[in-house]
Image (cartoon, rainbow, N blue to C red):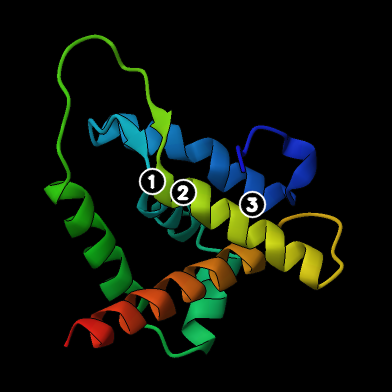
Amino acid sequence: MQPTNPNQFTEKAWEAIVRTPDIAKQEQHQQIESEHLMKALLEQEGLATSVLNKLGVNVQQLRDRTDEFMRKRPKISGSGGNVYLGRSLDTLCDRAENYRKQYGDEFISVEHMLLAYAQDIALAEQCSQNLN
């Protein structure tokens, strides 16, 4: 799902989506990935951090790991500055949209995005267990 229509998202979810290209450019990344969205959600110091705190997630550690992951990604140089939707963010938006439909909500919200992240984590853990 291409996150291009603000009418599909709650205000805070859309604010985070809009912030992701800026974060990618700041980091000199060509593709906007789910980690850029996570950073945008964490920067809001709002619903996402509140939910994560209630779940017992160390939000500062999540911030640090997100930043560390982004530091390791390939950087681009030059004046192009164009950024493109990456596969992980596209997949995450698809999952968030599925959660929106599943719960009968009108808009994709921060909560739907967090559920989509949780599904990503669960799939990653399952894949790593299958490799062992």
Q: Residue at label 1?
A: 33
Give the mark, 2 or 1, whose residue is nearer the N terminus. Answer: 1
Q: Which mark is residue 46?
A: none
Q: Residue at x 44, y 60 (%)?
A: 42
Front: mark 2 or 3: 2
Q: Residue at label 2?
A: 89
Residue 104: image quadrant is bottom right
Give the mark, 1 or 3, whose residue is nearer the N terminus. Answer: 3
The amino acid type of the residue labelled 2 equals Leu
Residue 56 image offset from top left, x and y in percent: 43, 90
Residue 20 image offset from top left, x and y in percent: 45, 40
Vertical position of residue 68 compared to residue 124: above or below: above
Vertical position of residue 115 compared to residue 22: above or below: below
Residue 66 image offset from top left, x and y in percent: 28, 60
The amino acid type of the residue labelled 1 equals Glu
Q: Are marks 2 and 3 in contact (CB under 8 Å)?
A: no
3D distance between C-alphas at marks 2 and 1: 5 Å
Front: mark 1 or 3: 1
